[in-house]
Amino acid sequence: MNEPASSGSVSAVAADAVFMDRALALAARGVALTSPNPMVGAVLVRDGLVVGEGFHTYDGVRHAEIVALEAAVKRPAEKHGGLVDRAFRHDIKSAIPSGVLTPEGACEAARGATLYINLEPCCHTGRTGPCTQALIAAGVSRVVAAMADPNPAVAGRGFKQLRAAGIEVSIGLREAEARRLAEAFAKWIVSRQPLVTLKSALTLDGQLVLPHPRLSRSHRGGRARPPLPRIALKDRWISSPESRSEVQRMRHASDALLTGIGTVLADDPLLTDRTGLPRRRKLLRVVMDSRLRLPLRSKLARSADKDLTVFTRAKEDSPKARALRRAGIEVVRVAGRGAKPDLRAVVEELGRREMLSVLLEAGATLNSAALSAGIVDKMRVFFAPKVAGFSGAGAASNGFQAARELHDLTMAQFGADFAVEGYLHDVYRTR
Ligand code: AOF
Ligand code: ZN
C-alpha cells in the first residue's frame, strides 16, 4: 500500500508533498460541514500548475474531486478553449450517468492532470455517483491519495477501478495526517458508533477542581449554582485562555458534547460552540442525568433549542420529564441497571443519529464510568501549572481494576499549559 510517490526526481517528490499538504488543508476547511461524511480536499495539477481544487461539504453534495474538476472546467475560457459551465453532472441522478463528463463539457481542462486527494475516490453511488468514473472520463492520468476509504462500500475498490482504467495510482503520502483527519468518520462508518474523546483540564497535582471557599463547603444539591461572583474570572479556570480556545476548536470539530449532571449542578456550564464558525448541524449537548435533576433554570436548559438531550433512568412520563420537554429539551430513557445508565447504549444511540464524534467534558464520576464502560477512544488532558493541594480519594475509589495505557501520544503547549493526547483504542480497527 505504502508506495513512494512516483516520477522519481527529488523535486517531483517534493511537489507531491506540497500538493498533498494543500489537499489536506482544503479538506480541513470542511470541519463541521461534512459530517456524517468525511473531510476531503482535492487538488488537480497539470504541468506543475493547479488547474482546479476544492473540498467537500455535506450540503454542497458534490465530492471534493468533482468540485476540483468543475473548478478546472470553469477556469477562464481563454485558458482552456471555450469551456462551458456544468460540464459535470455528477450530482444529478438522470439519464446521464452520474460522474461522467457531459458532451458539452468535452474539455481538456483535466486531461493528463494529477489529482491529489486525502481519501480514496469513491466508486459507489450514494447521494452522488462514483468519483472514479468522473476522473476516468475527465482523462486524469495520475491519482495521488493519502489513504484508502474506510467505508466498506469503497475500501480499495476505487483504486482498483482507477488502475484498471490505466490511471497511475500512488497511495500513502501523508497517510498519518490523513488518518487523523478521518478518524471519526473511520470509526463511525465501520462500527456506526462515534469516536469519543475525553477532554479534561487538571492542575499539576492532578486535581479537577480548584480550591474555593464556597466549594469547600457542601458541594451537593439539586440546584444549579449561580456564578461565583467574588472570585476574579481568570482565577476560576484551571486552564489558560489558549487552552480554552483550543477546547472551543475541539467543540467546533465535534458533533456532540457529553457531560454529567454533576458538572451541570456544580458549574452551570453553557457547553456551546462559541467559535462563531459555520457548522452544518448544531452541536448536540447531551447530559447524563439518571434522576432528572437538571434545573429548568440552568444555563443549559434555558438555552435549549433543539440541541439538548438528556439521557435518564427516570420515567419518560414523570412530571419533571414533561417539564423538561415543555422547555424544548429531549428526554430519553436509556437502558441500564438501577440508576446506572448503560453508556454503551448512549453511544450507540448517538451513532444512530449520525454523530461521528463526541467530546466528553465531564467530572470524575462520568469520566471514570465512561472509561470503565470502554467507550472512550482517546483522551486529551490539559495540564496547568497550578497546585490545588494533592487531595482526594484518587484511584482507590473509582472501581478501576488496573491502569489503562494510552498510545500514539502527542503533546502541545497552549499558553502556560501542556496538553497530552493519546489513544485507548485503535479507531481503525473494529472492536
Ligand atoms: C470521495 N470524495 O469528497 C467524499 C467521499 O452519499 P455520498 O455520495 O456523499 O457518499 C458518501 C461516501 O463517499 C462516504 O461515506 C465516503 O465513503 C465517501 N466520501 N468520497 O470520493 C469525497 N466526501
Ligand atoms: Zn466520491
Image: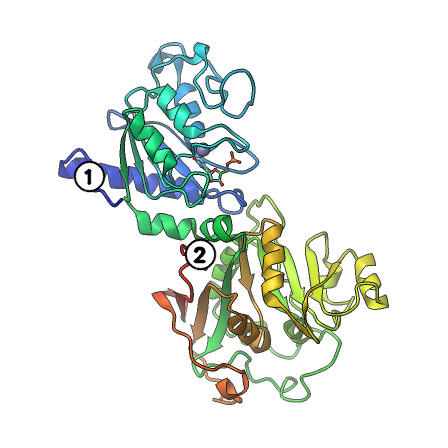
Q: Who's the residue at 62% across and 62% down the image?
A: 345
Crowding near the residue tagged with mark 2, few <14, some 14–19, many ≥20 C-alpha atoms within 10 Å: few
Q: Is residue 114 visible?
A: no
Amino acid type, callout 2 = Thr
Q: Is 321 on the left-hand or right-hand side of 208?
A: right
How far, Cα to Cα, is label 2 from label 1? 34 Å
Q: Who's the residue at 55% across and 80% down the image?
A: 209
Residue extending farthest to the right is 319
Q: Is residue 38 visible?
A: yes
426 or 118: nearer the viewer: 426
Question: At numbered mark 1, what does the secondary structure look like: helix, strand or loop?
Answer: helix
Vertically, is 417 above or below 149? below
- To which quarter of the image does residue 193 belong? bottom right
What residue did someone put label 2 on? 430
Q: Which mark is residue 77?
A: none
What residue did someone put label 1 on? 13
Instruction: Give coordinates of residue 56: x percent, y percent.
Output: 47, 36
Instruction: Give coordinates of residue 304: x percent, y percent.
Output: 72, 57
244 or 133: nearer the viewer: 133
Amino acid type, callout 1 = Val
Vertically, is 428 above or below 206? above
Looking at the image, tell me whether mark 2 or mark 1 is earlier in sequence order: 1
Q: Is 430 on the left-hand or right-hand side of 257?
A: left
Quadrant containing the N terminus in the rendered view: top left
- To which quarter of the image does residue 116 belong? top left
Instruction: Give coordinates of residue 5: x percent, y percent.
Output: 22, 39
Number of numbered discs on residues? 2
- Please state which of the two labelled residues, at mark 2 or mark 1, is closer to the viewer: 2
